[in-house]
Image (tube, rainbow, N blue to C red):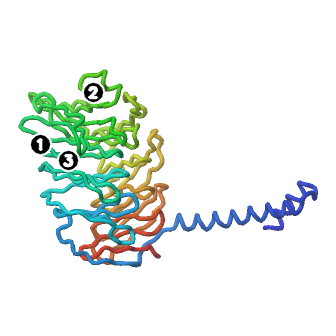
């Protein structure tokens, strides 16, 4: 093959600069070889795994685990621990929360006592700030600036509060009778924008609506800083999400809509109405995902879209899952006894049975290394065949 390529190029150049041609051919062949090896590695399918390192769990009261940047968060009613993917503790902190809930941004971790009134905000080094809240917390979100958006209830009203440890910057009251009940909210990374989904029931009629807030200079010109409000009628809006600082995805019961919100939201893409009932929705900084049954009902279908609405993937698969999430370029399914990992390209990375029950699956590189959380251990594993 090498001689054939070199012969053709030499012929084309009529024998001139042969040594440069030979060097170019060598570079091309090396590049092709590297590309082949990378492709075989990246597209490889695994059906088993080996345990590289294990750490016994001593946390019977743990509420959950999640990935934060390249680290792992473990939290319970008594405190929080941040570990490296090599299972070494970076820092930990104590608190006493009845119902802890953790949200993260790139630089911060917030733990809120849902139903209580306390919020702890940690930076990546474990530095702590406490936010005092006088109302019953329903939901929180945290930005990349360390500001916290709080949805809280008091008597017959809900309050949207933007605060840090030193002061409240925004405090907006919504009344249940006029405005309804909050379903979800999303907070931008720059702390300047908030999106909420509410459901109102009045005289037996249901109205769902989404409200866009701007807390910057533009928002000062609008009442209650609301720069846009959309009604969805009887169609529920269970999830709203910022994909990046200026891109918002609204998931309704019949379609999803992507807005660009540099200041005032502008609709960029509206999907077709769902032809099947959606079982799960996924959202990351790069992808929007929908999972439904196929036409026969025997298999599931996952569809991925980019933030500008282009369809990136439509793939059928057969797997009864309990949880699913998208992390980087992996779509991770788990049912406790089996796992399925599909790359966003559509290739299956892993499908196989677990050696013991797995409660959480956390990728820690983009290839074949994962963290498995079992009832007894935290296992660092490597996929094998």
Graded by Cα atoms within 10 Å as few (under 14), some (14 to 19) or many (20 or more), the crowding at tag 2 reads many
Q: CA distance from mark 1 to mark 3?
A: 12 Å
Q: Residue at x 40, y 64 (%)?
A: 363
Viewer-nearest residue: 204 or 220: 220
Q: Secondary structure at mark 3?
A: strand
Viewport quadrant of the N terminus: bottom right
Decide: marks 2, 3 in contact (CB < 8 A)? no
Which mark sits nearer the N-terminus, 2 or 3? Answer: 3
| Image coordinates for residue 256, horizontal then vertical, percent | 35, 39
Which numbered tag is attached to residue 135?
Answer: 1
Q: Residue furthest left?
A: 155
Q: Nearer the viewer, mark 1 or mark 3?
A: 3
Q: From the image, tell me which residue sits under label 3.
A: 131
Question: Which of label 2 and label 3 is nearer to you?
Answer: 3
User: Residue sitting at 36 percent across and 38 percent down?
Assistant: 248
Question: Which quadrant holds residue 210?
Answer: top left
Please tell me whether mark 2 sits on a helix, a strand or a loop: helix
Residue 378 - label: none
Q: Is residue 194 visible?
A: yes
Task: Return the residue at label 2.
Answer: 225
Q: Residues within 10 Å of mark 3 (few under 14, many from 20)?
A: some
The residue carrying pointer 1 sits among few (fewer than 14), some (14 to 19) or many (20 or more) residues within 10 Å by Cα, namely some
Disc 2 to disc 1, how far (Cα)? Answer: 22 Å
In the displayed structure, would residue 156 be above or below residue 324? above
Q: CA distance from mark 2 to mark 3?
A: 23 Å
- Does residue 184 appear in this view? no
Residue 305 against residue 216 in the figure, above or below: below
Name the residue located 29 percent from the left edge and 36 percent from the top edge. Answer: 195
Residue depicted at x 26% and y 40% = 185
């Amino acid at each position: 093959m090498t001689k054939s390529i070199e012969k053709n190029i030499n012929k084309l150049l009529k024998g001139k600069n042969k040594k440069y041609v030979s060097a170019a051919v060598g570079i091309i062949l090396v590049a092709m070889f590297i590309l082949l090896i990378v492709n075989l590695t990246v597209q490889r399918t695994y059906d088993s795994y080996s345990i590289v390192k294990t750490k016994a769990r001593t946390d019977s009261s743990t509420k959950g685990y999640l990935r934060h940047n390249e680290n792992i968060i473990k939290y319970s009613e008594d405190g929080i621990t941040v570990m490296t993917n090599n299972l070494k503790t970076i820092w930990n902190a104590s608190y006493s929360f009845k119902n802890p809930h953790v949200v993260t941004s790139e630089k911060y971790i917030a733990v809120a006592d849902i139903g209580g009134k306390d919020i702890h905000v940690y930076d990546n080094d474990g530095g702590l700030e406490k936010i005092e809240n006088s109302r019953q917390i329903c939901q929180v979100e945290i930005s990349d600036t360390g500001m916290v958006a709080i949805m809280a209830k008091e008597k017959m009203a809900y309050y949207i509060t933007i605060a840090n440890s030193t002061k409240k910057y925004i405090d907006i009251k919504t009344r249940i009778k006029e405005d309804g009940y909050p379903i979800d909210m999303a907070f931008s990374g720059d702390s300047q924008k908030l999106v909420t989904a509410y459901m109102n029931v009045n005289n037996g009629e249901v109205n769902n609506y989404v409200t866009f807030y701007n807390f910057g200079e533009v928002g000062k010109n609008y009442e209650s800083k609301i720069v846009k409000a959309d009604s969805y009628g009887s169609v529920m809006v269970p999830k709203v999400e910022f994909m990046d600082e200026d891109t918002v995805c609204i998931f309704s019961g019949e379609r999803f809509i992507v807005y660009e919100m540099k200041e005032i939201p502008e609709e960029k893409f509206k999907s077709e109405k769902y032809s099947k009932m959606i079982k799960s929705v996924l959202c990351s900084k790069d992808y929007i995902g929908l999972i439904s049954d196929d036409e026969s009902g025997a298999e599931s279908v996952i569809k991925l879209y980019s933030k500008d609405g282009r369809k990136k993937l439509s793939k059928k698969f057969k797997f009864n899952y309990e949880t699913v999430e998208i992390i980087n370029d992996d779509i991770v399914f788990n049912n406790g006894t089996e796992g399925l990992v599909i790359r966003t390209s559509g290739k299956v990375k892993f499908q196989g049975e677990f050696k013991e029950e797995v409660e959480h699956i956390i990728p820690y590189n983009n290839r074949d290394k994962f963290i498995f959380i079992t009832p007894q251990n935290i296992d660092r594993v490597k996929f094998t065949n």
